[in-house]
Amino acid sequence: MRKFSFGKYALPIYAVLAFTYLLIPIAYTFVFSFNDYRRSNIAWRGFTFDNWTSVCEAQGVCEAFATSVSIGLISTAIATVLGTMIAIALVRYRFKFRSAVSLLLFLPMATPELVLGAGLAAQFFNVGAEMGFGTIVIAHVMFCLSFVVVTVKARVASLDPALEEAGRDLYGSPAQVFWKITFPLLLPGIMAAALLAFALSFDDFIITYFNSGPTETFPKFVYTAAAKGLPGEANVIGMSVFFLAIAIVVTVQVRSSLKAKRLAKIK
């Protein structure tokens, strides 16, 4: 008779429980996106597709979502360009205060968002800046920049310099070597950094709350509406973003797997 070993099943059981725990809020959001609510979306009233077919009927939800997407795209574009240049400079060049710059780049990542948001708000107030869309973009670029640098820096450090040297040996100009060799090799890291920066920007609430003024972003809208239960339309947008993120991840994984299989056949 075989002896039952709890240790053999402990890790799978723990993984299932942890995964279930993580999915509970997502499942709640998904279920209540179909709730036939009236004023409050806390209690279940009945099943309906109306929230999905008329997403923008809830006042302010689509405007707030569009604002968050706009801020995220602008902040991501600026932070990705600047962060990529900084990452290349830190890995490939030696200059004064290089170590200090690397250390300072980690400060926004290590500083609590409450402190960072309040400090930025104080600075904007001191210079007389009007709180709104522009101050949010500046704040988001500041904290997204560090994540972009760290992500792209790891990719730059992993590149083989011999590939670029081969391009120069073939009489390629510095610009040609960068755009035809270096940039394509860096592109996966840059894309990963951009996606991370957009996710951080779109999701941010604390820093945005301190520096947004009257501008309403989607996280601010959710925070304000949470007191009486989010409108079903907000749940729809949240689930749409979730499904889009899953689709992107699955697509990237499938493409990587197919590419690896093709390379294996060639070898």
Image (cartoon, rainbow, N blue to C red):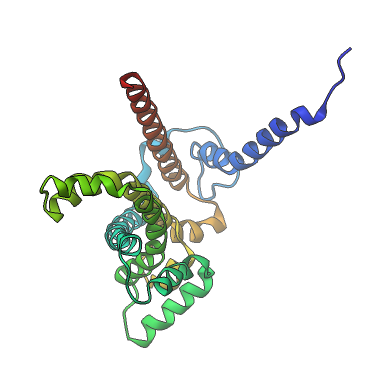
Give the mark count.
Answer: 0
Q: Residue furthest top?
A: 1
Q: Residue at x 32, y 66 (%)?
A: 137
Q: Is residue 60 visible?
A: no
Q: Residue furthest front?
A: 169
Q: Is residue 60 left or right of residue 12?
A: left
Q: Nearer the viewer, residue 20 or 192?
A: 192
Is the residue 126 above or below the residue 232 in the image? Answer: below
Q: Which corner quadrant holds the N terminus?
A: top right
Q: Nearer the viewer, residue 103 or 158?
A: 158
Using the rendered view, name the quadrant where residue 10 is placed.
top right
Q: Residue furthest right?
A: 1
Q: Which corner quadrant holds the C terminus?
A: top left
Q: Nearer the viewer, residue 195 or 261?
A: 261
Q: Nearer the viewer, residue 156 or 138?
A: 156
Question: Residue 53 appears at what percent x and percent y?
Answer: 36, 36
Q: Is residue 102 visible?
A: yes
Question: Residue 232 appears at what percent x and percent y?
Answer: 47, 44
Question: Residue 228 appears at what percent x and percent y?
Answer: 55, 55
Q: Residue at x 39, y 39 (%)?
A: 244
Q: Is residue 107 left or right of residue 60?
A: right
Q: Residue at x 65, y 41 (%)?
A: 21
Q: Is residue 147 left or right of residue 7?
A: left
Is the residue 50 above or below the residue 78 in the image? Answer: above
Q: Residue at x 46, y 70 (%)?
A: 103
Question: Residue 176 appears at what percent x and percent y?
Answer: 13, 50
Is the residue 237 above or below the residue 79 in the image? Answer: above
